[in-house]
Amino acid sequence: MAMGWLAAAATLLVLWWALQGRFEQWRRARWRAQPFPAPWRRILRRRVPLINRLPPPLQQRLKGQVQAFLAEVPIIGCRGLVVTDEMRVTIAAQACLLLFGRTERFHNLSQVLLYPGHFVVERAAPRPGGVLQDERRQLAGESWQQGQVILSWEAVRNGAAWPDDGENVVLHEFAHQLDQATGPANGAPALPGRMHAAQWTAVFRAAWAQLHASLARGETGCLGDYAAQSEAEFFAVATERFFEQPQALQAEYPALYAVLAGYYGVEPLHWQHD
């Protein structure tokens, strides 16, 4: 009797999860199908020039993703900041660039916390002798495995305004969010079915070694020294360069550019540049 009850409960649970997944897909499809508001379109043109480079079909697809993102993910102002549509659309448009090739959403993401400027965090930092010492740091962005992304509006606005400098806090932190979908960020995010983990690992290890060899010679290259801090930062920085400096990344790390193109499902190298 008990075994039969447990089997029935398990069946109902599986059915509930399946129905919930279908409902979420239906709801997201409805959000994406809504007409994109004209004021939001003006915000994209004014605040996110990178979007203007996308081919028209990708622009249309991105707008649908933005609508679904903003319907699902609250963006909460901190330190007295009043969040406007300009802020919401600017953040969502950049974040959704990462969703073209692999998924419909950031599965763990529950909210975005937005500060007016850089924010201060306190962390225990290791010191010689195994001692931990509290350290205060000013940050422009941070991604938490629990599903929060924290951003500075000043950094978001500046990163969007200069789409060729290779530095974009939204792309960086949301790359971490993808990386954290299956555990702590380690530069090995869950891959779409068409990609093989062995290829990803081999390419990233070779590029990681190339970066460290370049730094040892005093050459920073297109990735810079921050990417050498950890595999997680390497992936996030490479994502920034992939979208904002694709020519430089492809020239210096052609295999890395190729696997990122496969992962993100786009070819920024072919987008129209100013």
Image: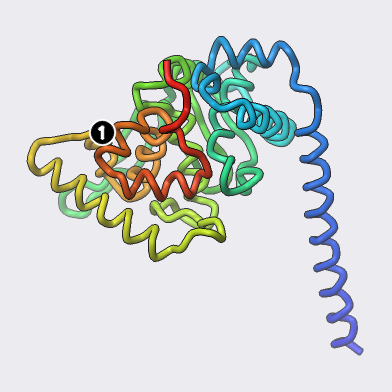
Q: Residue at x 85, y 66 (%)?
A: 15
Q: Quadrant of the C terminus?
A: top left
Relative height, residue 124 to residue 114 (above, below):
below
Residue furthest toward the right? 1
Residue under the point 62% across and 47% down: 103
Q: Is residue 36 left or right of residue 256?
A: right
Q: Quadrant of residue 86?
A: top right
Q: What element carries label 1?
A: loop
Where is 202 relative to 137, above or below? below
Q: Name the residue under label 1.
A: 222
Q: Which residue is drawn at 75% across and 33% down?
A: 32
Residue name at image x 40 percent, y 33 percent: 240
Relative image position of residue 242 (x, y in whole percent):
39, 36
The location of residue 207, given as percent across then percent down, is 26, 50
In this rendering, the count of numbered labels is: 1
Dividing the image into 4 quarters, which one contains the N terminus?
A: bottom right
Residue 268, visible in the rendered structure: yes
Kind of residue at badge 1 = Cys
Can residue 75 be seen?
A: no
Q: What colouring method underlies this structural image?
A: rainbow
Q: Quadrant of residue 233?
A: top left
Residue 151 location, x and y as percent?
A: 50, 27
**Above or below — where is 57 with respect to 19?**
above
171 and 113: which is toward the camera:
171
User: Crowding near pointer 1: few (<14 within 10 Å), some, many (20+)?
Assistant: many
Q: Is residue 164 left or right of residue 228?
A: right
Q: Nearer the viewer, residue 256 or 272?
A: 272
- Looking at this view, is 115 or 187 the one in front? 187
Residue 220 image point, x, y percent = 18, 34
- Tell which residue pokes out farthest to the left in this image: 217
